[in-house]
Amino acid sequence: MFSSLINSQQEPLDFTFHPGTRENALVILGHGVTGNKDRPLLVALADALAASGWPCLRLSFSGNGSSGGTFQDATITKEVADLQSVLEKIPPQTKIAYIGHSMGGAVGLLTAVREEKIRVLVSLAGMFFTADFFQREFGTLTPDHDCMWEDESFPLSQAFADDLLAHKDLLDAAAAVEVPWLLIHGTADDVVPALDSEAAFAAATLADKKFFSMEDAGHSFDETTYPLIATEIHAWLDAHLQSF
């Protein structure tokens, strides 16, 4: 579908396309903090959905994986702009679903409420209380000095901190969602608690919505849960993306 993708800052975005048999449809998958397009969850879902006919595009946001840019500049705000740059390249007749994991769920929510091209939204362990996440995971660290989870590959930047704290929470955005929205969260998630998805689900009074709770699943889920997640998403896409 694409030979290359770049964002508004002319940084190349790394991606993998999985062909499918469904015409004029595309499922975009976005990762979370410190992730990239090759996280096992995203690969497994793209493989399964493509096998069910859904063309899929796994995307690494700028500063992550093999995409251009620097990790220090990676924020929710910049990743929303990355996703909008991708959407601009997609033919207007294409029906688009977006699946976002963790902070990628926040990116999808904020994009879906301002971009009509996204027809269906799926959030996996979505981060919607962004300030709480920052304080819980990084509140004792010093931005531009310390690293996320003591990993030198992922320096904690002031830009990242300021962006999460400025968004605070995304419940107003959730209340504005009008597209069909599937939220999936594990009860054993110790990075982003299921409360984030529960609160977003309650706030989304305008959307056709479903909350699917996965007993004992952690933040990144695992190989035993991938098939069930793929089945839930396939059913949601079949019921809602096809109806447009």
Image (cartoon, rainbow, N blue to C red):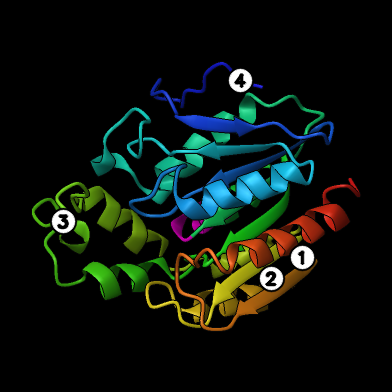
Q: Position of residue 157 (x, y in %)?
A: 20, 50
Q: Are the residues flagged by discs 3 and 2 in contact, CB closer than 8 Å? A: no
Spatial separation of the CA atoms under disc 4 and disc 3: 34 Å
Q: Residue furthest top?
A: 3
Reply above or below: 33 against 51: below
Q: Quadrant of the C terminus?
A: top right
Using a 10 Å C-alpha cutoff, classify the residue at mark 3 as few (fewer than 14 neighbours), some (14 to 19) or many (20 or more).
some
Q: Between residues 104 and 168, which one lies in front from this camera angle? A: 104
- Checking the image for residue 194, the label placed there is none
Q: Are the residues flagged by discs 4 and 1 in contact, CB closer than 8 Å? A: no
Q: Position of residue 113 (x, y in %)?
A: 65, 52
Q: Nearer the viewer, mark 1 or mark 3?
A: 3
Mark 4 or mark 1, earlier in chain: 4
Position of 100 compared to 6: left or right?
right
Query: Regarding mark 2 in the picture, which secondary structure is present there?
Result: loop
Q: Position of residue 137 (x, y in %)?
A: 27, 70
Q: Main secondary structure of the magenta part?
A: helix
- The residue sitting at 78% across, 32% down in the picture is 94
Mark 3 or mark 2, earlier in chain: 3
Q: Between residues 134 and 50, which one lies in front from this camera angle? A: 50
- The residue sitting at 72% across, 36% down in the picture is 55
Position of 99 compared to 194: left or right?
right
Spatial separation of the CA atoms under disc 1 and disc 3: 38 Å
Spatial separation of the CA atoms under disc 3 and disc 2: 34 Å
Q: Quadrant of residue 53?
A: top right
Q: Are the residues flagged by discs 2 and 4 in contact, CB closer than 8 Å? A: no
> Which segment did they paint magenta?
102-108
Q: Between residues 51 and 29, which one lies in front from this camera angle? A: 51
Name the amino acid type tagged 3. Answer: Cys
Q: Which residue is mark 3?
A: 147
- Checking the image for residue 2, the label placed there is 4
Q: Are the residues flagged by discs 2 and 1 in contact, CB closer than 8 Å? A: yes
